[in-house]
Image (cartoon, grey):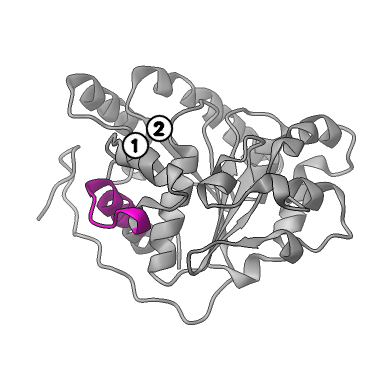
Amino acid sequence: MPTDLLGREYETFPAPQPRHEHGPARVIAMCNQKGGVGKTTSSINIAGALSQYGRRVLIVDFDPQGAATVGLGINANTVENTVYTALFDPSVDPHDIIQHTDFKNLDVMPANIDLSAAEVQLVTEVGREQILASVLRKVRDEYDLVIIDCQPSLGLLTVNALTAADGVMIPVAAEFFALRGVALLMQSIEKVQSRINPSLEIDGVLVTMYTRTLHSEEVLQRIYEAFGDKVFHTVISRSIKLPDATVAAAPITIYAPNHKTAQEYREVAREMVARGVVA
C-alpha cells in the first residue's frame, strides 16, 4: 500500500465517474490570511481538475486583486458587472455576472479593484455577514462545487465567505512563517462557527510549495500535528510550471496535463471526491 510524505498508508484514489446531474453545490472558502501561500493557484487548479472529472465548478473571485479572474482568461476591467455588483445591487441577477471560461464545466464570478471598497460599505449594511450567502443561494443548485477564493485578510469579506461556506480549505505553504498565521485563521473560523455558521467545517489542509528539504519536512510534520487527518495525503510541490500556467490563463491540469504538479492537483481532486467533500 502506498504511503504519503508523512508515512500514512492510503489507497490510491480512483478517478471519479463524471456526473450527469449537477447540484446543489458544496461551497468551500479557500482561506488563509497570509498571502502567497497558493490560494488562487489551488482554487484554479482544483477547479480545473474537478471540471475535467465532470463536475460543474464555479470560482467566486473574492479578492480585489482579481487574480482568479485573470488566471482564467477573463479581463475583469472590461466586464460590466462583478461580484461587487452582486453584493450591493439586489436587482442584478448573479447569473448575469458569472462568466463562462474557455474550459468546459468551469465558470467564474469575476472581481476587480472595485471590491476593495466593499469592506467599508459592508460595515453599514443590514445582515452584513450574510450578503454573499444570499447571492450564492441563487446559483448553487447549478454547480457541484463553489470555491470562494478569499483575499489574504480576516476582514468582513472573509467573514462573508466563511458565513456562505459549508467548509474551509486551508492552503499552507511548507514554510515556517506560513504556520504562524494559521492560529489566527482558526480563531476566526471558530468565531464564525459559534456565532453565525455552526455547520462550518474544515474540509482539508493543503500543503503547498513543498520542496524536499529538512525545513519543509519539519513544517509538514508540524501541520500534521496541528490538523491530523485533515491534512491531504497529496502535497503540492513548488514548481516553475505553475506561473507558466498562470500566464497562459489556464489550469495546469489543462496547460501541462502530464506535469508532476498537474498530477498532484488531480490527486487532490480525487481525494476530495473520495472524502465526500465533493459529490
- Is 199 in front, or is 2? 2
**Taking 193 as reference, is 272 above or below it?**
below
Mark 1 neighbour density, 10 Å: few (under 14) some (14–19) many (20 or more)? many
- Expressed as whole percent of the image width and height from the top left, the position of residue 213 reads 18, 23
Q: Which residue is mark 2?
A: 172
Q: Which residues are magenta?
A: 254-269
Query: In this view of the protein, can residue 72 be seen by the observer?
Result: yes
**Taking 120 as reference, is 266 above or below it?**
below
- Expressed as whole percent of the image width and height from the top left, the position of residue 217 reads 21, 26
Q: Which residue is mark 1?
A: 207
In the rendered view, does 14 fall on the left or right side of 131?
left
Q: Image quadrant of residue 16?
A: bottom left
In space, the residues marked 1 and 2 are separated at their CA atoms by 5 Å
Q: Are marks 1 and 2 in contact (CB under 8 Å)?
A: yes
- Is 240 in front, or is 145? 240
For marks 1 and 2, the one nearer the N-term is 2
Instruction: Residue type at mark 2: give it.
Output: Val
